[in-house]
Image (tube, rainbow, N blue to C red):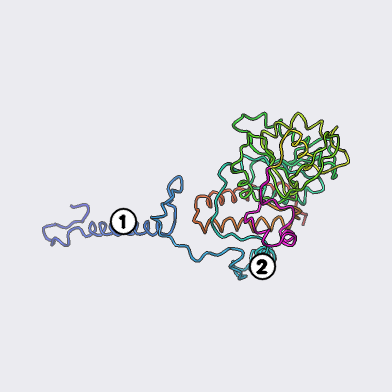
Amino acid sequence: MNFICGNRSPKTLPASAKCPLLVCITCLLAIGIITMLSTKATRESLSPYILTSFSFTPIEKSVCNYTLPTFESFICDNTRIDRFPQTSTTPSNNSFDVYRKKNLENYCSIVPIPRGGWTKATAYTEKDIVFVIFTAAVFFHTRATAARDTWISRITNYYFLSATPYPYLPVSVVPNAGEDKLSNMKKLFYGLQLIYQQQMKLSVSNRQKWFYIAGCDTFILPHHLLKRLDGLDYTKPLLVGGHSGRITCRGDINPKITVEFPSGGAGFFLSMKLFEMMQPNLTNFVENVWPHTSEISDVALTCLAAQLGVRITRRGGFWSNVPDYMLRKHGRASFHRDLEPNGFHYVKPDEMYALDEFYVNQYMDRLISDRNWNELIQFTRRFVSSHYELLRKKRRECTLPKI
């Protein structure tokens, strides 16, 4: 008996009828291969990446036939209010469509709206920066938490400096600094010593290269900010900032000198070299040189740098107030001269969340417009990871009321 074709003698069958099952299998295999190749070709024409077992492999643009539809700013161009399906429950002002219409869309007529042409920083990454944020216990649940939940959630190295411990930020405690405005001096000068000691415990290759100083009501755009360091050498003593003013140094400084100081509200950089040079002088300066009645720590640190022979290296994009204030004060031409602001100061918690959502979408808009898929995927993965890390933090710190 022929096991494949059954109990039939091949001599009694015409050639075309021999083993019909085998013929069918062959046909099905052929159809399957054709379908697979067709699907693969379609997928390659629609996507700039081929999915492999381990990674996404970029396809050259000349091979990719993918064509973007007419590009739109996700917040500013597509202004209909039905972007996403409506919930079956009671409509909420927190839904994206409603919130965008009432809040996010306002920024479209205030801040610059670049739609493409994105270039990333060339000299440093955010891992090269330590963000030093001075705060106070009264702001832990408002400004500081809003900063942590938004831009800081995607930052690798950061310190909150305060006199009061609080595990959920977390805070680096500066003992006996106090929690009023005058405490800014001690928090900053003593805090920088604590951070330096921690840096010295790391291997040279693992130490950070720049230290960015700001308050907890400062909203930062790190992907813009990093560009201000292009062309600068962290092994040189540098103080980098903007939105500056001029003032005569106070206290027991002889001779009296006038300095241009970077706005502490907008924030400023110290290079690792300047950070090292300041260390032996920090305690004496805050205790014996600078008046104990003065809280202007940004000016004080600039005056110390000047005594060490270092003056400000000025860069653009450092804004000392919220967007609508900067527009009113400086006018559209001046405010929009720099398309990529580094950040804004005096930002209240609700606006911190709004600005972060707005600028995250603007960053993604530009990457999509430029077909910069590699950076878009990197950012998306980082954003998703930071989102779930934040949810885990929220779960630990929030106690819901009893029902």
The segment highlighted magenta reads 313-342
Q: Is residue 201 above or below residue 42?
A: above
Magenta stretch contains residue 321 = yes
How many numbered marks have been drawn onto this rendered protein structure? 2
At numbered mark 2, what does the secondary structure look like: helix, strand or loop?
Answer: helix
Q: Position of residue 403 (x, y in %)?
A: 77, 57
Magenta stretch contains residue 394 = no
Q: Position of residue 117 (x, y in %)?
A: 54, 56
Residue at the extreme right of the image, as rendered: 293
- In this view, the residue in front, 250 or 392, is 250
Q: Position of residue 275 (x, y in %)?
A: 70, 34
Dot 2 or dot 1, earlier in sequence: 1
Q: Position of residue 401 (x, y in %)?
A: 77, 54
Q: Amino acid at mark 1?
A: Ile
Of the two numbered discs 2 and 1 in the rendering, the one whose residue sits closer to the viewer:
2
The residue to which callout 2 is attached is: 101
Left or right: 62, with 384 as reference point:
left
- Residue shown at 78% from the left, 54% from the top: 402
Q: CA distance from mark 2 to mark 1?
A: 50 Å
- In this view, the residue in front, 234 or 76, is 234
- Residue shown at 61% from the left, 33% from the top: 206
The residue to which callout 1 is attached is: 33
